[in-house]
């Protein structure tokens, strides 16, 4: 191994990482401010929101793009008189080149194409470089044509973005200068250089100069043959096809990321193309970035913000797009590189006896690692396909159903003179709002009508107020840990008050003087309502044995304010009871672990029921688990259990088998604890989504 080259490559990569990290840090601080530290959980959820069909579109378009690039290289190499590898071999080389292109600064990764051609198929370096140079220039011409078409479209149909016209002129000038440098600039440069040094006493450098001029002569000859072959029309057509396939692939990912998560962002094709072209222009700047990170995002953000998108949405979309596209490119490129090496070693006669194949260990190791990671990611996405669909907003909201005519009388008999009310979240009005029904004789009434989704309503101990979580965007899936703020609703006046930002799954303390909520999926925060003071009582990676990459879900504080019941996911997938002093007891699988109002037992959702789920109780001392409730009827997929403040009734949601908490047809049920499971009464009759109920009784 050439250790000097190895350490030089490592130095380039470290420099690129440093510059990219600095640029990204500046962009995050500008776009996200105090939330910059949460960018990676947000990116993970954005990437997870991309459904498999869009990934398939990207991969298909990327393969079409590579096929067109391969044909273009074949045309150029054939015109230069060089040995042209078979289509499969050249396709594998081109796919690998697309992987390496952004790894090193200033597009040095493109040289992998030249190296693989020479080492695998004895193609002269001059021919490889000339094909790269011509392909690059025709890429610029195709880009100028596409931007010119955008300008023409804007002139006819929408307001013109005049900076696009400047971009067309700039790209065209760069392409013309490039062609001028090659035809005839390089030939003249070689001739003048020979004249300048002809009278020098070269000494030791004579052999070096002779080799350099010999290479330049070969390079000029290859360019001259290509020009004389009359292939400009073919190259432009192939280059246009390459551009169209490339932007189709990127647009599919842009659309898949933006629509479910940022519905306010324009995804119209011309606007998106402008952002993608700007991002590519940013990545092409002569900055020593790693894989273009930082410069790519900056270029795309500038255009998106100019078109009206927020800085936060612009950064997150461009960064998620860049990450996901790189994953796909490295999956394809790593696979192609391994296949190429297998084919080359299998056919040793294609390699020059005088040239030894030297494995680019750094490139190979990087490609293998990224390919394995991307393959694992895709496998997980395939397994979690239904879960990923939960991150896409629903388009249907159900319809009202006919209530059970005997249900009202049964409810009166069950309550035995008690009065109270239910609250829950429902999308029957077109988005998730809060609804209320007085007991026993009321009908469902809408409490809120905000355009954003509202979940997790919890009634105060005195029954006068409700805390709930409201999404920051029009629609946010309940799986999103950070996209929520917590509000307080006064039931008497209807007035709302924001209590905490970035606060989800709020619950009350037993005395009603504090609330607890989940922040960023990693923290449990306590807030005093009187003062607004916040205190982190639990955090992943900083408390007991919860690893840093573990999510803390559905936190419920015990009535004595000493222990927290949580559901852990990620590195640890268990329910647990955690003491304030740091002790932790895992309580098995399942989710939505919570305390009874008097703290005498815990209860949770776990498997083992008729339709997979059932409700279980746990003894706080021994943590012994016992099946508590499993409805024998049609709606037996139970979730969202909540015990009434009086301790003798359970309200819960259940579907007939569908799982997604904020999409499936969940109905609200009421059960008198201790009675047969079949006595549970259905409280809601709507084919939309009803979830997260709570009950208050006098």
Image (cartoon, grey):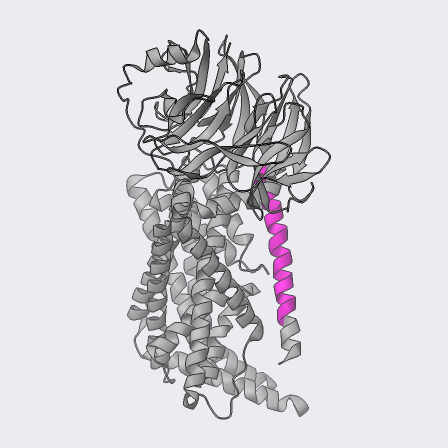
Residue 267, horizontal then vertical, whole percent: 37, 42
At 55% from the left and 67% from the top, the residue drawn is 366
Q: Is residue 220 visible?
A: no
Considering every residue shown, the one lying at the far right of the view is: 581
Considering only vertical position in the picture, is 118 above or below 313?
A: below
- The reply to whether residue 462 is visible in this rendering is yes
Above or below, 175 against 519 in this view is below
Picture quadrant of residue 446: top left
Most common secondary structure along the magenta stretch: helix
Q: Which residues are magenta?
A: 9-32
Residue 27 counted in the magenta span: yes
| 673 is higher (above) or lower (below) than 243 | above
Total residue callouts? 0
79 in the magenta segment:
no
Q: Residue at x 40, y 37 (%)?
A: 660
Q: Identify which residue, 63 or 462, lies in the foreground.
A: 462
Residue 364 image position (x, y, % from top left)? 53, 72
**Which of 244 and 219 lies nearest the eye of the viewer?**
244
Q: Quadrant of the N terminus?
A: bottom right
Residue at the location (43% across, 12% down)? 415
Q: Position of residue 594 (x, y in %)?
A: 56, 30
Give the quarter of the image for residue 431: top left
- Rendering quarter of residue 577: top right
Q: In x, y percent, where is residue 339?
A: 42, 75
State left or right for residue 57 relative to residue 527. left
Q: Is residue 185 above or below residue 495?
A: below
């Amino acid at each position: 191994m050439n250790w000097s080259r190895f350490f030089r490559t490592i130095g380039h990569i470290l420099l690129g990482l440093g510059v990219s990290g600095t640029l990204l840090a500046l962009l995050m601080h500008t776009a996200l401010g105090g939330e910059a530290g949460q960018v990676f959980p947000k990116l993970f959820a954005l990437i997870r929101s991309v459904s498999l069909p869009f990934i398939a579109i990207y991969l298909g378009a990327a393969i079409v793009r590579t096929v067109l690039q391969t044909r273009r290289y074949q045309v150029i190499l054939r015109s230069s008189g060089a040995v042209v590898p078979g289509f499969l071999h050249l396709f594998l080389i081109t796919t690998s080149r697309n992987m390496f292109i952004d790894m090193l600064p200033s597009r040095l990764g493109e040289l992998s194409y030249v190296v693989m051609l020479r080492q695998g198929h004895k193609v002269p370096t001059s021919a490889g470089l000339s094909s790269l140079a011509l392909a690059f220039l025709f890429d610029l011409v195709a880009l100028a044509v596409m931007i010119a078409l955008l300008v023409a479209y804007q002139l006819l149909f929408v307001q013109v973005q005049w900076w696009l016209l400047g971009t067309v002129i700039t790209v065209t000038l760069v392409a013309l200068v490039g062609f001028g440098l090659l035809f005839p600039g390089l030939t003249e440069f070689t001739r003048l250089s020979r004249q300048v040094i002809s009278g020098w006493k070269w000494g030791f450098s004579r052999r070096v100069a002779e080799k350099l001029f010999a290479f330049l002569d070969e390079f000029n000859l290859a360019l001259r043959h290509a020009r004389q072959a009359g292939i400009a029309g073919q190259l432009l057509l192939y280059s246009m096809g390459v551009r169209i396939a490339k932007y189709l692939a990127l647009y599919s990912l842009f659309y898949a990321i933006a629509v479910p998560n940022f519905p306010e962002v324009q995804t119209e094709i011309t606007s998106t193309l402008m952002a993608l072209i700007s991002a590519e222009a940013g990545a092409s700047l002569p900055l020593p970035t790693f894989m273009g990170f930082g410069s790519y995002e900056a270029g795309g953000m500038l255009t998106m913000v100019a078109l009206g998108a927020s800085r936060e949405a612009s950064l997150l979309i461009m960064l998620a797009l860049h990450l996901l596209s790189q994953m796909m490119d490295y999956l394809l490129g790593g696979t192609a590189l391994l296949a190429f090496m297998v084919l080359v070693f299998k056919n040793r006669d294609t390699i020059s006896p005088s040239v030894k194949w030297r494995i680019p260990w750094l490139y190979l190791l990087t490609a293998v690692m990224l390919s394995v990671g991307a393959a694992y990611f895709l496998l997980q996405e395939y397994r979690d396909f239904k879960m990923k669909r939960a991150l896409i907003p629903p388009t249907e909201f159900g319809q009202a159903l006919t209530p059970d005519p005997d249900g009202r009388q049964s409810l009166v008999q069950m309550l035995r003179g008690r009065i109270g009310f239910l609250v829950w979240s429902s999308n029957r009005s077109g988005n998730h709002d809060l609804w209320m029904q007085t007991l026993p004789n009321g009908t469902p009434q809408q409490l809120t009508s905000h355009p954003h989704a509202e979940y997790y309503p919890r009634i105060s101990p005195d029954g006068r107020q409700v805390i709930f979580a409201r999404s920051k965007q029009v629609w946010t899936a309940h799986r999103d840990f950070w996209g929520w703020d917590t509000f307080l609703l006064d039931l008497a006046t209807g007035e709302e008050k924001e209590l905490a930002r970035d606060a989800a799954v709020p619950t009350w303390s037993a005395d009603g003087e504090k609330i607890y909520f989940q922040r960023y999926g990693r923290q449990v925060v306590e807030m005093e309502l009187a003062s607004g003071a916040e205190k982190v009582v639990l955090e992943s990676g900083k408390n007991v044995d919860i690893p840093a990459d573990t999510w803390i879900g559905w936190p419920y504080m015990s009535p004595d304010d000493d222990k927290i019941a949580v559901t852990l996911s990620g590195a640890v997938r268990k329910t647990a009871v955690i003491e304030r002093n740091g002790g932790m007891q895992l309580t098995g699988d399942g989710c939505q672990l919570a305390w009874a109002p008097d703290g005498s037992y815990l209860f949770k959702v776990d498997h083992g029921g008729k339709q997979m789920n059932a409700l279980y109780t746990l003894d706080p001392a021994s943590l012994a688990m016992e099946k508590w409730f499993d409805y024998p009827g049609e709606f037996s997929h139970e979730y969202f259990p909540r015990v009434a403040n009086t301790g003798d009734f359970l309200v819960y949601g259940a579907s007939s088998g569908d799982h997604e908490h904020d999409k499936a047809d969940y109905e609200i049920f009421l059960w008198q604890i201790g009675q047969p499971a079949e006595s549970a009464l259905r409280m809601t009759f709507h084919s939309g989504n009803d979830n997260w109920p709570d009950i208050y009784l006098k």
